[in-house]
């Protein structure tokens, strides 16, 4: 028998349908309440159409510096996943290098903006 787990995501929207809150829980979690998040990225691979289906949402409270960190960390975990899923660790290394360069450029822009 295949074990199944359910992930529930609740998005609270304002009058203009802009996310105000994002909460999630998983049936296998030991948490007794919903977890809060300021942003989310969910991707599904449609093997028949060979396309990625995505849901990217962030709340009004998500700050630009948090978004840069979120992207950096997401790219780093994507590199880890790619390295585990394929025999091409060199490309995972390239993804990590790009992520570091991306974050460095963000920090430079932030520094220039503050001057």
Image (spheres, rainbow, N blue to C red):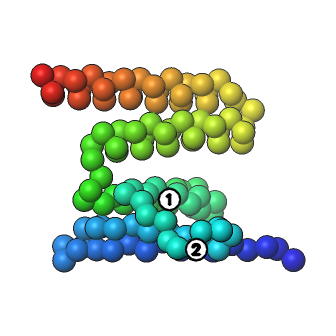
Quick one: quadrant of the C terminus?
top left
Q: Nearer the viewer, residue 35 or 46?
A: 35
- Say which mark, if any, is on residue 42: 1
Depth check: give the residue in front, 95 or 73: 73
Mark 2: secondary structure: loop
Mark 1 Cα within 10 Å, few/some/many (few <14, many 20+)?
few
Please tell me in which quadrant of the rendered image residue 18 appears.
bottom left
> Which residue, given by chain and number where applicable, does mark 2 sit on?
32
Q: Which residue lies furthest to the right in this view?
A: 1
Instruction: Locate residue 90, reporting x and y percent.
Output: 65, 23
Q: Tell which residue pokes out farthest to the left in this image.
A: 115
Q: Looking at the rendering, in which quadrant would you find the N terminus? A: bottom right
Which residue is drawn at the image coordinates 31% and 29% (left, top)? 106
Q: What element carries label 1?
A: strand
Please name the residue shown 55% across and 25% down the image: 94
Determine if residue 7 is in view.
no
Residue at the image position 63 percent from the left and 37 percent from the top: 80
Find the distance from the CA under tag 2 to the CA under tag 1: 23 Å
In-image side of 8 versus 63 (left or right): right
Q: In this view, does 1 lie to the left or right of 63?
A: right
85 w.r.t. 50: above or below: above
- Residue 53 drawn at (x, y percent): 49, 61
- Which mark identifies residue 26? none
Q: Is tag 2's residue or tag 1's residue first in the polypeptide sequence?
A: 2
Is residue 41 depicted above or below 98 in this figure? below
Q: Picture coordinates of residue 110 (x, y %)?
A: 23, 29
């Amino acid at each position: 028998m295949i074990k199944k787990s359910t992930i529930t995501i609740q998005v609270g929207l304002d009058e203009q349908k802009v996310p105000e809150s994002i909460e999630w829980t998983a049936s296998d979690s030991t948490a007794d309440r919903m977890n809060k998040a300021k942003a989310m990225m969910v991707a599904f691979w449609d093997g028949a159409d060979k396309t990625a289906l995505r849901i990217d949402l962030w709340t009004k409270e998500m700050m630009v510096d948090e978004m840069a960190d979120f992207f950096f960390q997401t790219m780093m975990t994507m590199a880890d996943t790619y390295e585990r899923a394929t025999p091409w660790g060199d490309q995972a290394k390239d993804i990590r290098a790009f992520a570091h360069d991306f974050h460095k450029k963000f920090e430079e822009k932030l520094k220039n903006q503050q001057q």
